[in-house]
Image (cartoon, rainbow, N blue to C red):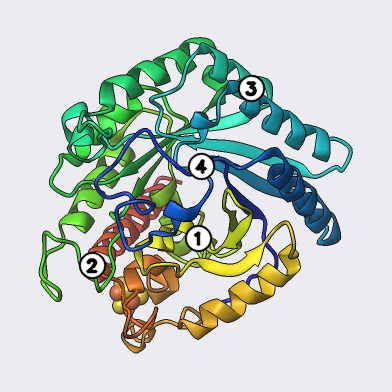
Amino acid sequence: MTPVKAFNGFVLKIHSRCNLNCTYCYMYNKSDTTWRKKPKKMDLYTFERTIEEIRAYAEKKQLPRIHIALHGGEPLLIGNEVLRRFCSLIRATFAETGIDVSLTIQTNGTLLNKVNCGILAEYGVGVGVSLDGTPDVNDKARLDHRGLGSASRVEEGVGILMDHHPDAFSGFLCVLDPASDATATFDYLTKFHPPALNFLFPLYTHDDHPPWKEPDSPETSVGDWLIEAFKRWSQSEASVRVVVFESLIHLLNGGASSTESFGESGRNIVVVETDGALEIGDALKVTADGLTNLGLNITTDSLDDAYDLVNSYLVDLGADSIAPVCESCAISHVCNGGDLAGRFSLSKGFRNPNVYCRDILKLVTHVDDAVRRRQQVLEAST
Ligand code: SF4
């Protein structure tokens, strides 16, 4: 693993609870329980200290561009007044710095309304919405605390956003369901005209294995699902970026990844919890209770300290190199062991191949073949 040179992504947990209770949620329904002791909301003092520290760090590291994501739980539970104050504080803090701040919010979409959409658009906040496909598929897992599905409320929220501030919509995050129809999922999501989609692997580890297959089974339903989605995307006239596929193509051409599913992306991101605690990637909450906690707090410690600690911490857990079987793998330059969560076991840390190893191998081989065939056709026609 290339050591992280500097953080350039900052995930701010402004509200640590959620109005949904998705069955697969890595925050509340997997290994980690630290959320129980966190304050529900980030207070203004912690938020101000966080933004000041990020600005000082970005200036010191001479970062031309950073990404700040407002996150939760469900970040819109913070309320409109505080949301406006937080967004305005970020924009004012960086106004004279020359640093380009890409500001986003990741929401479950159920609480989007005219007022908060207006605030987000006013402060140039890109709105990412989590939606797992057609209502019947989405509502298998994305339920509220009464057990009711969320799809109709998300459709309504995205409709309001698209009616009033379509430029603020940054796209969908979709946790893929291998039992669903990939083509129908792609077609449904693109009906909303998102500029981008990302399909995420369901988060599992070697200790909490994907329930639909035995460990070491040759089953590749996740890879097959992604291949179907890739085919649909390749044939589609919808102009939509699909991050996971674009990243694969970049990696196959020697470029970089912009998804945590492959390559080395995502390791230059730090999470700030509602109490100011600094943590590594929050998706790693699926691995073990408290594993993401660095033991530092942004109100008392520096991001430089956190950066050093993240690197040594990941090395201790074995994330600095891939498993022996991955070293001899023909596609390790693309996969790099896949996402860290899928490599994890309590006994060996990250020193495992991915739980989706066969799926990734099949997908990468398919995309590689498709890209080569396309290049050959293009070369033959010139
Ligand atoms: S495809 Fe499997 S063996 Fe190859 S790098 Fe990825 S996880 Fe390792």
**Rendered residue at 53%/46% (across/down):** 39
First in sequence: mark 4 vs mark 2: 4
Q: In this view, does 124 lie to the left or right of 360?
A: right
Label 1 neighbourhood size at 10 Å, few (<14), some (14-19), many (20+)? many
- Residue 272 lies in quadrant: bottom right
Label 4 neighbourhood size at 10 Å, few (<14), some (14-19), many (20+)? many
* Of residues 4 and 11, the one drawn nearer to the viewer in this rendering: 11
First in sequence: mark 3 vs mark 2: 3
SS label for mark 2: loop
**Mark 4 sits on what residue?**
40
Foreground tag (4 vs 1): 4
SS label for mark 3: helix
Residue most toward the bottom? 324
**Mark 3 sits on what residue?**
81
Q: Residue 308's x, y, as percent?
A: 68, 75
SS label for mark 4: loop
Q: Residue 255's x, y, as percent?
A: 54, 62
**Mark 1 sits on what residue?**
281
**Mark 2 sits on what residue?**
208
**Res 3 seen here:** no
User: What's the residue type where badge 1 is placed?
Assistant: Gly
Label 2 neighbourhood size at 10 Å, few (<14), some (14-19), many (20+)? some
User: What's the residue type where badge 3 is placed?
Assistant: Glu
User: What's the residue type where badge 4 is placed?
Assistant: Lys
**Res 4 seen here:** yes
- Residue 126 lies in quadrant: top right
Rendered-image quarter of ligand 1: bottom left
